[in-house]
Image: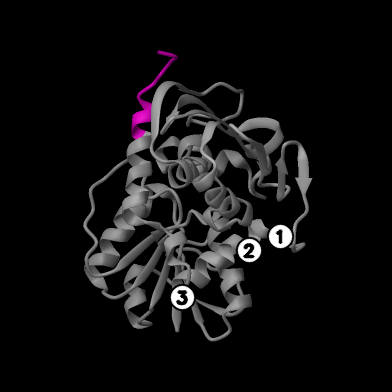
Amino acid sequence: MNIVIIGFGSIGNRHAKIIKKNFKFAKLFIVSRRKIHFKGAKRLKDLDDIKKVNPKYIIVATETSRHFSDLVYLEKTFKNLDILVEKPLFDKFKKIKIKKNKVYLGYNLRFHPKVLFLKDYVIKNKPIDVKFITNSYLPNWRKMNYKFSYSSKKKLGGGVLLDLSHELDLANWIFGTIKIKYCVVEKKSNLNVSAEDTCKLLGKVKKSNFFMDLSYYSKNEIRQIYVDTKKNSLLIDLKKNRLKIDNKIKKNKVNSNPLENTYLDIHKSIIFKKKTNFLCSLSDGQKINKLIDKIKKYKRWK
């Protein structure tokens, strides 16, 4: 089985390591304009070179601003491919027709065991209050200087809404469509970025109150989901892989690194066609783009 990764930044490198380690039967090819230093993969100079290797699975790990043109090319050139596009789908909503191939989005947190627990839990226990809080510090994300990363550049598809859109996807997938009531999206910190570095959102998901706080500039880094029902209060800490119910910690059945395993799980799902209902579809990805576009229209509290 031939697998191609388009783009070899930090996320492309991560996918390459996972595939090399866990899918010994696969031959790996990497499309990169620069020379790569990765044992076990062959470099392809451009998209046209992909035709030479007849892949079954392609991972699009380029800058967000390139996703649309990459997908258009792949749909025009190939058929019967499985294509995983790193999140978010595009830098803004764009219409695209994919008929010859299957496209999925890299919202890997859907495979996190605590997320799957929560998705099952809220089916029987209706939430009355939902909060997502993700405080991150952009300079800590990658080995490279953050100023030169796509995350910091608006024109490349950076900014908290696109970069941290996992939270929007999880909210929609677990609780239902977010209805915005109030929102602020702005550049607030002294970080050297051209994109927005914070988003505060108030709204509704079905009958539940909803709040989301995303930031690039907090050195107190957390990634947490709070859910209150009429019966219980839940806290899910995705960074620490911790679940609290009514302030009591629930022990993990298996000691592992579930955050890293979610990347492996998303590849297993696509390659082996298992748990495909967990995957984010093209239409789901388009919904997130529409939601982000709508949020960005809010320049101040209204």
- Above or below for 129 versus 280: above
Q: Quadrant of the N terminus?
A: bottom left
Residue occupying image coordinates x 23% and y 53%: 96
Labelled disc at residue 257: 1
The residue wearing badge 3 is 271
Q: Quadrant of the C terminus?
A: top left
- Above or below for 194 versus 250: above
Tell me which corner region of the image, top left, top right, bottom left or bottom right, holds residue 81: bottom left
Q: Is residue 202 visible?
A: yes
Left or right: residue 118 versus residue 102 is: right
The residue wearing badge 2 is 261
The magenta stretch spans which residues?
A: 293-302
Residues at discs 1 and 2 in contact (Cβ within 8 Å): yes
User: Marks 2 and 3, how far apart in space?
Assistant: 15 Å
Q: Is residue 43 visible?
A: no
Q: Would you call the spot at circle 3 few (<14 residues within 10 Å), some (14-19), or many (20 or more)?
A: some
Tell me which corner region of the image, top left, top right, bottom left or bottom right, holds residue 22: bottom right
- Expressed as whole percent of the image width and height from the top left, the position of residue 18 reads 60, 70
As shown in the figure, which amino acid type bears the numbered disc 3? Ile
As shown in the figure, which amino acid type bears the numbered disc 1? Asn
Membership of 278 in magenta stretch? no
